[in-house]
Amino acid sequence: MKVKITKKGEVNIVRVEGAIKSGDEYELAEKMEAYIIPGVAPKFIIDLKKVPFINSAALGLFLNLHKHAYELKGRMVFASLNSDVENLMEITKLSGVFEIFKNVDEAMESFDF
């Protein structure tokens, strides 16, 4: 798994490449938490275009990060899910918790500036 975080305005775009499997979620959490600054509403787009698989621990990580961002009046949304990851989100009912967009551009437009 590779993680690259870029900033576009106030939004952190997290591009993940490869399967998120056992142990990877810690690296991902560490990288994302570095962008959460006390007193600042964090804004994240998680781009999963190149992610074929997500394990249950990663889903738990995303829930925790989503909650943390929400508590700080921020947002965390997802973009570019492949059909397998999208099905997983639907089966686990997380598609009702997370905002999911077709691509990064649509996700970016959803942020109010």
Image (cartoon, rainbow, N blue to C red):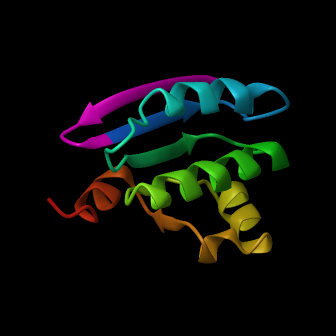
Q: Position of 108 compared to 23: left or right? A: left
Q: Position of 112 compared to 42: left or right? A: left
Q: Residue at x 62, y 33 (%)?
A: 29
Q: Position of 10 compared to 51: left or right? A: left
Residue 17 visible, this angle: yes
| Quarter of the figure that contains the C terminus | bottom left
Q: Quick one: 87 or 62, which is closer to the camera?
A: 62
Q: Furthest-front residue in view?
A: 39
Residue 78 visible, this angle: no
**Residue 54 image-quadrant placement:** top right
Helix, strand or loop: magenta stretch:
strand
Q: Which contiguous range is marked in magenta?
A: 1-11
Q: Position of residue 26 (x, y in %)?
A: 72, 28
Q: Quick one: 97 or 16, which is closer to the camera?
A: 97
Q: Position of residue 62 (x, y in %)?
A: 64, 50
Q: Residue at x 55, y 33 (%)?
A: 16
